Amino acid sequence: MAPPALSVSSLSKTYRTGLLRRSGVQALDGVSLTVEEGAIFGLLGPNGAGKTTLVKTLLGLVHPTGGTARLFGAPAGTPAARQRIGFVPENHRFPGFFTATETLHAYGRLADVPRTARAERIPALLDRLDLDGRGDSKVKTFSKGMLQRLGLAQALLNEPDLLFLDEPTGGVDPVGRRAIRDIVVELRDEGKTIFLNSHLLSEVEKVCSQIAILRDGSLVRQGRVETLTAVERVYDLVATPLPAALREAPDLPLSSAPSGSAPAPDLARYRVRAEDRATLNAVLDRLRGADVQIESITPLRQSLEDYFIDVVDAPRDS
């Protein structure tokens, strides 16, 4: 059985401070998580939660105080791990006097990509990332969105299996954000694993299948986005208007939705609270028995932003 793309076990990191380095700051406190191949994984947390330290540890730039971190089974930071990853840092800086092609050749050499491979991959990456025709343009003339796409190009030069993206859409306009988002999904569909670190929760919600939330150096939540954001046992129902007898029935666990319009004039939106599957089906059977036509029923979910704020603002012992 192949190892996961990324596995972290009881990872800790303490930064020593003070004149004699006797005091310390705990950046990571026993973090354990696993990311399977082919996932788009989002790492979330407020400032100071330990996200940067975790990413630097996975890249081999920081040595942990305790625990282990492995990429495809190889210890983080080893040549075997590094040759399979690409990285786009936040606010990356390319020399402005380089052209896009010169930049990619320079970074390709740093990644030990052979010249023949660079000569083939660079034009293909420029074309894929909508930078075709700009290979001879100076980087200093590029917009923020173009710089982000150039950053993606350099990260893909060595054809990595695992891609680390730190705020990939930060400062980019909506059109540029969508273009980058589409590229990330394409890379996932090609079998690559994406590890995304971002404060733009609406972007994370659109592309990530799984997330983890750090707070004060500890992992406080991990799971699939749709599971974590589901409101327990509450459903959004769109149907034809209920007859008066049902609207006034005290034993029917159904109410008008507090907000949101129905998708058509002849439909209405309701909320159903059902303690279990049998109760939900009994409600639906009762509606059908009264000739109510059901358009859709879906579990009610809160936004990832609301869920995130609930988690990070919760009392520390919860």
Image: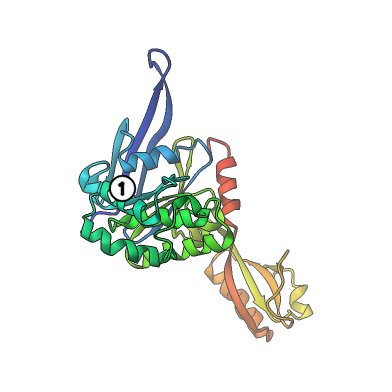
Q: Quadrant of residue 114?
A: bottom left
Of residues 178 and 212, the one nearer the viewer is 178
Residue 59 appears in the picture as rendered: yes
Viewer-closest of 116 and 60: 116
Q: Quadrant of the N terminus?
A: bottom left
Give the residue displayed 72% in from the left and 65% down from the top: 259
Q: With 32 as the anchor, is 231 left or right in this view?
A: right
- Name the image colouring: rainbow
- Residue, x 56% and y 63% (percent of image)? 175
Please state the horizontal and vertical placement of residue 300, each as a whole percent of the image. Answer: 60, 64
Question: The residue under label 1 is which amino acid type?
Answer: Ser
Q: Camera-side residue: 34 or 92?
A: 92
Q: Is residue 255 left or right of residue 215?
A: right
- What residue lies at 76% left-to-right and 81% top-to-bottom? 243
Answer with the quarter of the image where residue 124 lies.
bottom left
Residue 223 in view here:
no
Q: Please provide percent x and percent y for residue 161.
A: 29, 57
Q: Position of residue 276 (x, y in %)?
A: 54, 65
For this orientation, the residue located farthest to the bottom is: 291
SS at circle 1: strand
Circle 1 sits on which residue?
7
